[in-house]
Image (cartoon, rainbow, N blue to C red):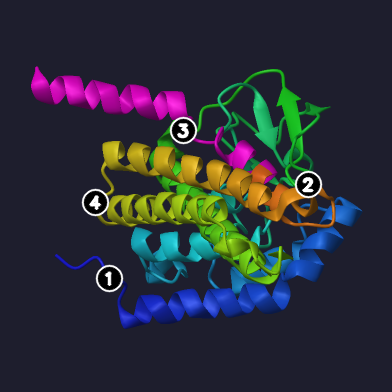
Amino acid sequence: MDFQPTEDQKDLRAGVRDLLAGRYGRDALRASVDSGVSVDRALWRELGEAGFFALRLPESEGGVGLGLPEAVLVFEEAGRALVPGPLVATHLAAGVVPGAAAGTAVVSAFDLGDPLVAHLGDADAVLGASSGVPAGEPVRSVDPLTPLHRVAVAGDSSAYREVGALLTAALQLGSALRTVELAVRYAGEREQFGQPIGAFQAVKHLCAGMLVRAEVARTAVYAAAVTGDAGEVAAAKLLADEAAVRGARDCLQVHGGMGFTWEADVHLHLKRAWVRAEQWRTAAQAEELLAEELLGSTG
């Protein structure tokens, strides 16, 4: 059994990384934060034209006709670039909501457990809503690029939960891998006492721990993309959430005081990771599912 990406998959990942680097690099990210615009409709359409949302839609329906492993690689790159917006929900809505596949429609979802909906103000449709886009009251969000609204009655998006959880795990994985890069780069550049701080054992341990968590999460996410098993998806989400949240925290520690400034990007990874950890499947829900499977296999 070979879990290494194929050449076509590597080319797909490289192409998406190049697209996002050119279209949504650091300057664009900071501009989004400064303006408070979390969904750029022009970018959304460009992603649609590139096949981002129609990746798993059959070719007979105008899609790309690829599978979950390819979608995971694509979403990993989006997480690395911190692209904001309801990427997962719009991808899931391809072929269901008109315009979702092409990126001409923005689709959100009931994926936060209680009557909270992310990006409701930008949404043309909401997965799990009984009809139309429900009205909601704004709720303060820890992430400046993930606006939240509380609606009167929660909808049901459980039919999309497994794939939604896996793609969200892929976003978390991309963020975790990016914070490893940021920490290692800063540790090699920043000097104290006449040498890079990366030479100090405490910093080495932080970076090593980040890398281990990210690589373990990568293995779990890729395996779940191949099998599609609910238990493996739950484990992947659990590990990816931990890698993203703890990785961003450790990256802040490596950066020291600089990491806590608004000018640094590390806090944006942490805030987004906190929000994603509550989407589609929380740690508690994943642990309950895995415990039930374990009890079932031993009973």
Helix, strand or loop at mark 4: helix
Neighbours of disc 2 within 10 Å: few (<14), some (14-19), many (20+):
some
Helix, strand or loop at mark 3: loop
Q: CA distance from mark 2 to mark 3?
A: 29 Å
Q: Is residue 6 left or right of residue 201?
A: left
Helix, strand or loop at mark 2: helix
For the magenta stretch, what is the residue range?
271-299
Q: Is residue 95 visible?
A: no
Which badge, 1 or 2, is on the more N-terminal residue? Answer: 1
**Residue depicted at x 68% and y 52%:** 106
Q: CA distance from mark 3 to mark 4?
A: 18 Å
Give the residue pinned by disc 3: 281
Q: Are marks 1 and 2 in contact (CB under 8 Å)?
A: no
Give the residue pinned by disc 4: 227
Q: Is residue 201 left or right of residue 46?
A: left
Give the residue pinned by disc 1: 4
Give the residue pinned by disc 2: 260
Which badge, 3 or 4, is on the more N-terminal residue? Answer: 4
Name the front one of labels 2 and 4: 2
Name the front one of labels 2 and 3: 2
Q: Is residue 148 magenta?
A: no
Which badge, 2 or 3, is on the more N-terminal residue? Answer: 2
Q: Is residue 297 magenta?
A: yes
Name the front one of labels 1 and 2: 2
- Residue 276: percent from left, percent from top: 58, 40
Q: Quadrant of the N terminus?
A: bottom left
Q: Is residue 184 left or right of residue 36?
A: left
Label the magenta part by its dominant secondary structure: helix
Kind of residue at disc 1: Gln
Which badge, 1 or 4, is on the more N-terminal residue? Answer: 1
Q: Quadrant of the C terminus?
A: top left
Reply above or below: 121 against 199.
above
